[in-house]
Image (spheres, rainbow, N blue to C red):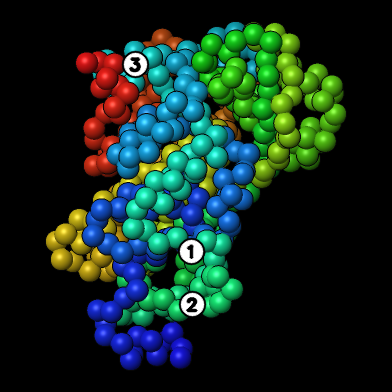
Amino acid sequence: MTLKQTFKQGSIDRYDYDVAIVGGGVVGATLACALRGSGLKVVLVEAEARSQATARGQAYNISPLSSRILDGIGVWNEIRPKLETYSKIRLSDADYPNIVQFLPEDLGAGTLETGTLGYVAEHRVLLTALQRSLQQSSVTWLCPAKVLKTDFQAQGVGLEVWADGAVQEIRVRLVVGADGARSPLRQQAGIRTHGWQYWQACVVATIKPEKPHHNIAYERFWSSGPFAILPLPNNLCRIVWTAPRAEAEAIAQLDDHAFLQQLSQRFGDQMGKLAVEGERYVFPVQLMHSTRYVLPGLALIGDAAHCCHPVGGQGINMGIRDAAALAQVVQAAHQQGEDLASLRVLRRYERWRKWENLVILGFTDILDRTFSNHILPLVLLRRLGLLVLQSVSPVKAIALRLMTGLTGKTPELAQKLPETLLSKNA
């Protein structure tokens, strides 16, 4: 029986699931957790085994807004003790002596968890907590599994899924693409994208400094690209070293001694002697934005919808906000008896997130291009900009709100402060 026949021979109201989420990474799992208790029947389809999916070596900058969303879906209390916080951000232009320092009080009292501007979370910590939460829910998890075919019709979406050594045909009302930057779902649906590959790539490594990191995050701009230092637990630091692609590949291939020699010139001497912990990774950098996020029966979230330059650590936070926004739109439509897979409903999500994401994409692109060059007028302009940030409080607050995810519409999941903040203020 073909996918089309499954719809023609069955009742329109007979679906195996209301929502199928394709991609069980952090963003897809966040959406699945957000839909728990909604009355919707949800299936999560993930290509990798759970242990393999959690084994990746990434670490993420988690914004205060993302922390509230994770608290809203009930996983923050498990995640929080395993994260490192940062209470200061230091922004500088290469060796230029003026340093802009951001502090929690720059945003005003009660906005953030006391003394915190953000968090640094390892991939395994986030995804393990999300997976554990889903195991205690009614969400069905097909893993490892792969979507072989999609068939979009007026009555719903048919999926051919390979799982447990066999092909299954399932019918759903709405399919959500959380399947990454090369999203097969997006490509099968014919949704075009705009963007480009940057001339740069990022070298990522974990460093053990001799001295304490004091919970400070650094973003240093060099003509070859941004250089970020993020504090991790156990006095480790994660570095994200952006350089032209060929140079980044060469840096990653250096032995530890030569690597640390070059790294010290970027890192500075504020933490003393450095040592390399674990492997180094190189990943390409791109800007990508889908021309649309939705079609009837389809919605895209996270990297399937957009990718940005890693400067400022915005990528994972954009995806978490997508998940919270889509969950809110879909649940509201379901409660009001609307067709949650209709274009009229799904465009509410697109209108909400597309333009907010576009602001971040533009912000990160301009930031990278303005600082990653030797052009004298731009050098003078950016240093003037740093001076303005340093001395004009309203401008500083706006920039910090953008970096911490506190601009734009706040999802209902995030409208209560995290319990850690409430307990400290009690």
**Residue closest to the far front:** 136
Q: Looking at this view, is 378 or 274 the one in front? A: 274
Front of the two marks 1 and 3: 1
Task: Identify residue for label 3.
Answer: 114
Quarter occupied by the C terminus: top left
The residue positioned 37% from the left and 50% from the top of the image is 136
Asked whether the residues under the numbered discs 1 and 2 touch, taking CB atoms below 8 Å apart as contact, a structural biologist would say yes
Q: Label 3 crowding class (10 Å Cα cut-off): few <14, some 14-19, many 20+?
A: some
The reply to whether the C-beta atoms of the residues labelled 1 and 3 are less than 8 Å apart is no
Q: Which residue is mark 2?
A: 168
* Residue 187 is at least partly visible in this image: no
Q: Amino acid at mark 1?
A: Leu
Question: Where in the figure is residue 373, as x and y percent of width and height?
Answer: 65, 29
Q: Nearer the viewer, residue 179 or 374?
A: 179
Mark 3 or mark 2, which is nearer the start of the sequence? Answer: 3
Disc nearest the viewer among 2 and 3:
2
Relative to residue 305, is residue 415 drawn left or right?
left
- Which secondary structure, mark 3? loop
Measure the C-alpha gap from mark 2 to mark 3.
50 Å
The amino acid at mark 3 is: Thr
- The amino acid sitting under disc 2 is Gln
Residue 73 falls in image quadrant: top left
Q: Which residue is mark 1?
A: 142
Name the residue rendered at 56%, 77% in the picture: 166
